[in-house]
Image (cartoon, grey):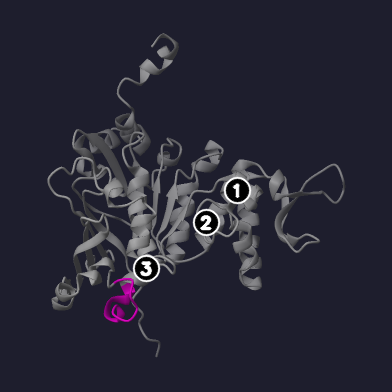
Amino acid sequence: MKANHRPQPRITSIQLRNWKNFTNVELQLQQRAFLVGPNATGKSNFLDLLRFLRDIVSVGGGFQEAVRRRSGVSSIRSLAARQDPSITVSITLGSSETPAIWEYTLVFRQDNQRRPMIDRELVRQNAKLLLDRPDKEDLSDPARLTQTHLEQVNVNRTFREIADLFGSIRYLHIVPQLIREPDRSSGRKNDPFGGDFIERVATTDKRTQAARLRKITKALQAAVPQLRELELWKDDTGRPHLRGKYEHWRPQGAWQMEEQFSDGSLRLLGLLWALLEGTGPLLLEEPELSLHPDVVRFLPQLFARMQRKSGRQIILSTHSPELLQDSGIGLDEVLLLIPQGEGTVIRVAKQIDEIGHLLDGGLSVAEAVLPRTKPQGIVQLVLFEDL
């Protein structure tokens, strides 16, 4: 008889206080989440929160390093946080049926020496308190509060599932030129901008690599009809390359190396690989960039199909009307970032009655939501020379 394995939990809710643009945010997250809003309202900063949690538990990371990579507590703390110097991050993990299996809360600030210090660290499992810091040992040795228990394998055994999920978070924002010129990112591992992308493909198990490239080739052929083959190839120095065979006047076709691929082909290739690599939450920043609008329209369906197989959570930012045209996107999946005087607030589109009425009237999610993200006074941009 097969054992029943509980599926990996996902992020079901987030509470933030004084994190960058967000002075006070509390929201529920679905299996997919589409972040929309004007420029500079915090879409990247919201995704960076999840990257921060990953950095805490990653090899070579930790709480101090995660803060250092963001230029210190003072750069993380909201400019509107004038009275409360602490930053609060609270994450709930669970499923649609049981949304609160785990709860992790971290409150931190900087001390008089500008060192990041933990004010509080809490862990609950099914509402049962497993960790509450600072404890007696912390109070007797305050240096302990420079590290989270989450990042320490000798003390996180009872709640390691949280660390494992945070460690599985992946962020992708492919910069095609870094794939073409990987020397720019020499020495970096898991570069979210693609500097080590081909190396990661090359070091993947051969059978897994071949299976993924076959799937990617079939998918790419829909967007790049001339493509016939895609393979990993090593030059005379042993350096790996991706090369594709394209239809050509020559009977056998013509091979092109990655430096000859279009930006759109490289970004779509990277996106497809990321969907096949890993099971944890996948963070995507404007995946529509460089892609043809007709390709972008099918991305939500592609994500949904992959999620049905893997159960993977996908959180992405977008400005694309084409991406949000998909009728399968629910209003509970759309997070609208709204700038206000004391920072950005986030509202689930389902909570805004007017958006629901517009959908009932036959408009798409894009037509109902995106006009709310248009910057005020944008018409002044055409008067640039007269300003």
286 vs 258, left or right, is left
Quick check: marks 2 and 1 in contact, CB under 8 Å? yes
Q: Find residue 7 and report its horizontal and vertical position in percent.
A: 36, 73
> Can you identify the residue that label 2 sits on?
191
Density class for disc 1 (Cα within 10 Å; few <14, some 14-19, many ≥20) is: some
* Pointer 2 or 3: first along the chain: 3
* Pointer 1 or 3: first along the chain: 3
Q: Residue at x 37, y 71 (%)?
A: 164
Q: CA distance from mark 2 to mark 3?
A: 17 Å
Q: Find residue 24 and report its horizontal and vertical position in percent.
A: 18, 47
Which quarter of the rendering shows the N terminus? bottom left
Q: Which mark is residue 42?
A: none
Q: Which mark is residue 178?
A: 1
> Can you identify the residue that label 3 sits on?
57
Callout 1: helix, strand or loop?
helix
Q: In this orientation, does residue 362 appear? A: no
Callout 2: helix, strand or loop?
loop
Q: Amino acid at mark 3?
A: Val
Q: Residue at x 35, y 64 (%)?
A: 56
Tell me: residue 157, above or below residue 44.
Answer: below
